[in-house]
Amino acid sequence: MHTRHQSRCSALPHHYIFPLFSKCSLTTHLHVLSAMHESNRLRRLGLVVDSEYRALICVVCGCALSCSGCQVTSHLWEKHQVPKDARTSITSYIHSLRLLDLSRLPPRPNGSPAHTNLKTKRGYACKLCDYLTASEERIGRHLS
């Protein structure tokens, strides 16, 4: 025999019946929401993650940032005077993303279009090989 609740549920069209979340899928759902919240928080701070290069970029400065230690929060304070309460716990989130250190980022391919979030710099090219750099000091060391 059907109870009053069972008969109401079976009378509903299929698209009104929602599956119950298992504990695992609910936890996963909460992690996704948390990550979305943190990603939006990064954007509000003027930061974006380049998923192709696994790098953190300051859109305001147009440069990739080192993610080691608390360098991102230092950058936000020293360059943009972002208050401490807005920077709180951002370092642990950035470390959880496992982004590449600046020294390990591969150079963008020659002739590639400008990156939408990075400033384009004039640079130096070695006439003897494919070496390129934006640093006069580095081209000098390369040529010596």
Image: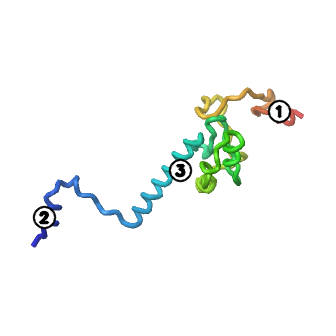
Q: Is 69 on the left-hand or right-hand side of 14?
A: right
Label 2 packing within 10 angstroms: few (<14), some (14-19), many (20+): few
Q: Secondary structure at mark 2?
A: helix
User: Looking at the image, which is closer to me, 129 or 38?
Assistant: 38
Position of residue 51 measured from the top left corner of the image (x, y, whole percent): 56, 44
Residue 109, image x, y percentages: 65, 34
Q: Earlier in the sequence, mark 3 or mark 1?
A: 3
Choose mark 2 or mark 1, whichever is in front. 2
Figure quadrant of the N terminus: bottom left
Q: Which mark is residue 139?
A: 1
In this view, the residue in front, 138 or 37, is 37
Q: CA distance from mark 2 to mark 1?
A: 79 Å
Horizontal side of 36 relative to 68 (left or right) equals left
How crowded pointer 1 is (Cα within 10 Å; few <14, some 14-19, many 20+) is rated as some
In the foreground, 55 or 143: 55
Q: Give me the residue at 70% from left, 39% from top.
A: 79
**What residue sits 53% from the left and 47% below the top?**
39
Q: Locate residue 62 relative to residue 11 in the image: left or right.
A: right
